Image (tube, rainbow, N blue to C red):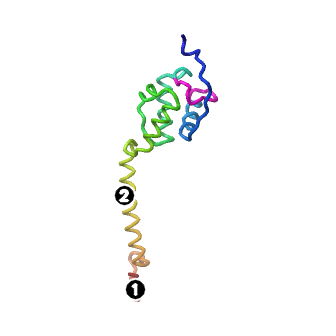
């Protein structure tokens, strides 16, 4: 039996992640109306297109998925399930540590700025301050 002639019933995306993946596959494979049980490789996908799909996933979802994962989960339904786990687990995002560090730095900067503002308006450098202005404490 030839797997390329097997007809899989069309099952439309059921979740937001499946819908996003279907949109990516339709764009990359240049095929309309891809169902969640359609096989990427039986639809004409190959390793080069798989890398394009993975790049699109990273761009849309912000998570890194190894290309081999598309070879292991060849349907949108399976890939979406894997992706939803990765999205739900921040440790799987490559940028997680960098983003956490940036958030910490931003919170520190905002805290410093809030302290500056609570001291009242600061005179421009080079001009004497107004001694009658009492700082707010």
Give how far across and how far down residue 110 sits, in percent.
41, 65
120 or 20, which lies in front? 20
Q: Is residue 38 within the magenta segment?
A: yes
Give how far across and how far down residue 56 sits, in percent.
51, 36
The CA distance from mark 1 to mark 2 is 32 Å
Label 1 sits on residue: 134
Residue that extends furthest to the right in the rendered view of this protein:
32
Label 2 sits on residue: 104
x 57%, y 33%: residue: 22
Looking at the image, residue 46 lies above or below residue 65: above
x 39%, y 78%: residue: 119
Q: Earlier in the sequence, mark 1 or mark 2?
A: 2
x 41%, y 70%: residue: 114
Label 1: state its secondary structure: loop
Range drawn in magenta: 28-40
Assess disc 1: are there few (<14), some (14-19) or many (≥20) residues with their C-alpha within 10 Å of its C-alpha. few
């Amino acid at each position: 039996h030839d797997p390329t002639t097997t007809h899989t019933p069309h099952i439309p995306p059921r979740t937001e992640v499946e819908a996003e993946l279907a949109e990516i596959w339709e764009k990359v494979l240049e095929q309309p109306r891809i169902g969640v049980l359609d096989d990427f490789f039986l639809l004409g996908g190959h390793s080069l297109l798989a890398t394009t799909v993975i790049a699109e996933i990273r761009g849309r979802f912000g998570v890194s998925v190894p290309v081999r994962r598309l070879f292991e989960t060849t349907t949108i339904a399976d890939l979406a399930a894997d992706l939803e786990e990765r999205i739900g687990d921040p440790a799987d995002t490559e940028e997680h540590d960098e983003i956490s560090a940036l958030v910490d730095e931003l919170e520190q900067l905002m805290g410093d700025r809030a302290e500056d503002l609570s001291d009242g308006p600061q005179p421009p450098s080079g001009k004497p301050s107004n001694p009658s202005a009492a700082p707010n404490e």
